[in-house]
Amino acid sequence: MNFWSKIKLIFADKTLRSRIIFVAGALFVFRLLATIPIPGVDKERLINLFSGSEFLGFLNIFSGGGMSNLSIVMLGVGPYITASIIMQLLTMMSSRLKAMYQEEGEIGRKKFSQYSRFLTIPIAVVQSFGFLTLLAKSGVLSQMTSLDMFVNIMVITTGSVLLMWIGELMTEFGIGNGTSMIIFAGIVASLPMAVSQLALTFNVSQIPLYIILTVVALLVIYGVVFITEAERPVPVTYAKRIRGSKVFGGVSTYLPLRVNQAGVIPIIFAMSILLFPQMIFKFLATAATNETVKNIATSLNDFASNGWVYGISYFILVFLFTYFYTAVTFDPDQISKNLQQNGAFIPGVRPGQSTSEYLGKVLTRITLVGALFLGGIAVLPLIVKGITGITQIAIGGTAILIVVSVVIDLIKKIEAQITMREY
């Protein structure tokens, strides 16, 4: 089936068309909310603050573009992502939470998601207070009374919870992951401004450099697609079983292990963890009354903002989170148990613990490739920026990775829906 036939089939199917329209409507509401600013914003100082801060540029990705306007959804899905990270980390320490997430099926995962939602609220309150204080000290916001601060915190927290709810509705009634789609929409919405800034600073003498950067961007996109789709097939054979006069099993298939099992989640996790200390240091550097605390916070902020330190920390966190999230989402013991219960085995490997160890070994080797690739893509724009000095691509690698991964996931889900309707 060619591309245009698929498009025609998508819009001819009422259910699929409704899902796509729902996603489009939800994204329209999100972009509308992202244009409503909180009271007392100095636009000129806000533009100057964002133009000189790579830290705020990364935060703007999480907010889906809401941070650059200081909108009522300025925190975006950041608090929800942070809450999800904390809950995922707790599964490594609590056997009860791990069983709830991995073994209790749909009911367990719903309960796990509910805990993440509850945790989102206090995180949003703390983050909104920190940002409002930081922005007030920077002169971007007019001086606020205690009542003004309380009202703004409630508005921003409510906006974050509302955005979390919209994202979950998109996941349930639309197509694709709602949280990823919100981040994707924010990145795409910022492209026209980035292109216009690049056009204003265009220099004819740098045309060869622009061509090289375009080729690099295309190679990165190709690499993301290749690694995302790459998999290591593990052969699986089902033993023959005789029931009455019928013979069941005896077929051979394979278990597909993806090279990048974790998708784009490690990038999002690493960004969230990496930005949190910087937010605290910036807050203390501007809000602390004690001179010693202020000096220490300023020094730590300068150290954390250093290009080399930031790049190395970013690479290491992406690498570690790739392994961590793969370990959370793929359990070799559970897969081995399921294969044994269904009378399946890997040729040349004993069922049970040996199968689990074999799968773990294979997964560790192929995840190394995926982790190195994700880490390299994450820091590549920082390296290019250091060499060329072009600031418009400071978040390019992360943005490209998220956009391409979300588009691939969306295409797969649409094709799955089309295939299901064909049958």
Image (cartoon, rainbow, N blue to C red):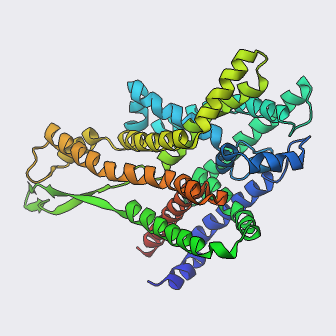
Q: Is residue 334 left or right of residue 109?
A: left
Do we see residue 120 in this rendering?
no
Q: Is residue 228 above or below residue 59?
A: below
Give the answer, above or below, for where 11 lies relative to 286. below
Tell me which residue sits at (40%, 54%) in the image.
373
Between 136 and 390, the one lying in front of the other is 390
- Relative depth, front residue between 142 and 345: 142
Res. 9 image quadrant: bottom right
Residue beneath the point at 83% across and 35% down = 138
Tell me: residue 42, above or below residue 134.
below
- What is the count of numbered marks? 0
Residue 376, given in percent of the width and then of the height, sits at 44, 53
**On the rendered structure, is 114 left or right of 121?**
left
Residue drawn at the location 63% of the way across and 50% of the way down? 167
Q: Position of residue 131 (x, y in %)?
A: 75, 34
Q: Is residue 145 above or below residue 31?
A: above
Tell which of 224 and 78 is nearer to you. 224
Residue 145 x/y as whole percent: 92, 26
